[in-house]
Image (spheres, coloured by chain):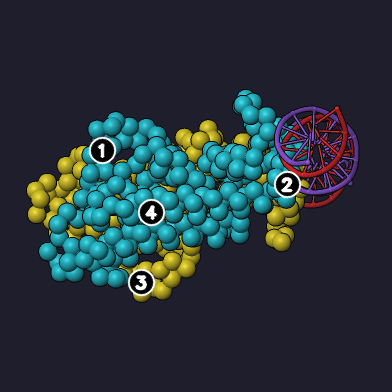
Chain colours: A cyan, B yellow, C purple, D red
Amino acid sequence: MAAKRKRLTRYDWIRAALSALGERGLAGIAVEPLAKQLGVTKGSFYWHFKDVDALIDAALERWAVEETRESIARLEGIGDPRERLRTLMKPSPASALIGSIDLALATSASDPRVAKWLRQHHRLWIEFAGRAYRQMGYRDPQASYRATLAYTAWLGFVSLVSADPSWLQGERSRRSYIALARDLLVPSTEGQSGKH
Amino acid sequence: MAAKRKRLTRYDWIRAALSALGERGLAGIAVEPLAKQLGVTKGSFYWHFKDVDALIDAALERWAVEETRESIARLEGIGDPRERLRTLMKPSPASALIGSIDLALATSASDPRVAKWLRQHHRLWIEFAGRAYRQMGYRDPQASYRATLAYTAWLGFVSLVSADPSWLQGERSRRSYIALARDLLVPSTEGQSGKH
DNA sequence: GGTTGTCAATACGCATGCGTATGGAAGGAG
DNA sequence: CTCCTTCCATACGCATGCGTATTGACAACC
């Protein structure tokens, strides 16, 4: 299928593993199917990695640490906390891809190879949102709760759309939905601990 | 493990399949592990079912049609639409179990054996919430959007808690979070298409 | 109490994935 | 050009899961 370079690197396997994870779940990370997809045999894999668990751990580390931290760092560059959250809530093809991995890992949350990286990923995003809400004037319990609500709403929306792509198919209605969700989750001007 | 009755029924296999689905995902529905768990051999399974796909379809049908419809019908008995949604958003052990199946199926959303039942399940719940919002006075686009938002927030919350059970561990904080989410998602008294 | 029907055990062939062992090709260093 | 490291192919044994075929146990019914 993809016989571009003859010799692979460790990172090629990680990329293939993450792709398979998003498409077929954790069980999709299997040596022989990935080898066939990469146009090589198992001999290549067992030179780069000790075993399958090593590949899974490396792939999840790359995903949780690098990809997540980079995305968060990019968003932290936005000064206005409201605009920061608004940007986060705008689904893009990239965020949809990340979401499919979120889902795959959520199913395997009980797997010890997955648990630690998944917990860290969720916490990083929720703490990111919590900082934004705190900068908007919310006190600490409410800020964390609102961050959790916004994050879970986004997580569930990705789940819903991946299950039923025809949901809010039109670009118009999807934008309208996101606009409503944003207005409810990140209020426009009010925001002190007072009530209005 | 469970050598209670000697002879099994078709429904025993379906129950075991749903349990395995919630715990280990779609791939957890496998004949020989289930047989071992039920204390029998494959010979039993292939008398009750044609193949694995037949078991998967029967289990998902039971889940999507009976369990979902029954839960919805129970809730529809509550007259006040606000109280109806409030009851839905109160997570119970039962809803947590259903949520784990939600998650397992969300990962396998692309699987054709899963897609149709999962879509129906989501639509049933969102339409249920949409009816409630419409009874509260919201017009049709906003009612559907709010229903989608509430459902996805719930779906994502189940996902988050299953990934990290220590999240909002205390009963106090979890109640406070749910109270906030309810106040934001199903407003207390306002609700006409007007803005306040 | 023998017959029929229901449910399950046993034994088999097949496919796929893991992990190992060993030999070989390709490219840079000298 | 030679050697040595890097990367991969081939071949094997093992485990697990699917599906089939055949036989057997137990119950109900006549």
Amino acid marked by disc 4: Ala
Name the mark nearer the viewer: 3 or 2: 3
Q: CA distance from mark 3 to mark 2?
A: 43 Å
Q: Chain of mark 2?
A: B
Q: Circle 4 sits on which residue?
A: A73
Q: Say the numbered circle drawn on residue B32.
A: 2
- Binning the other alpha carbons within 10 Å of mark 1 as few (below 14), some (14 to 19) or many (20 upward) gives some
Name the mark nearer the viewer: 3 or 1: 1
Amino acid marked by disc 2: Glu
Name the mark nearer the viewer: 1 or 4: 4
Q: Circle 1 sits on which residue?
A: A175
Q: Nearer the viewer, residue B6 or A186?
A: A186
Report the residue at 25% width, 35% height from top. Answer: A173
Report the residue at 49% width, 39% height from top. Answer: B109
Q: CA distance from mark 1 to mark 4?
A: 25 Å
Q: Locate residue A114, reporting x and y percent.
A: 57, 55
User: Do discs 4 and 3 belong to a common subunit?
Assistant: no
Q: Locate residue B117, reporting x and y percent.
A: 47, 38
Helix, strand, or loop for circle 3?
A: helix
User: Do discs 1 and 4 belong to a common subunit?
Assistant: yes
Q: Nearer the viewer, residue B159 or A72?
A: A72
Helix, strand, or loop for circle 4?
A: helix
Marks 2 and 1: in contact by CB < 8 Å? no
Q: Circle 3 sits on which residue?
A: B173
Report the residue at 15% width, 60% height from top. Answer: A190
In the displayed structure, B164 sits above or below C20; it is below
Left or right, A90 with reference to B67:
left
Left or right, A24 with reference to B45:
left
The C terminus of chain A: image quadrant:
bottom left
Q: Nearer the viewer, residue B7 or B55?
A: B55
Amino acid marked by disc 3: Ser
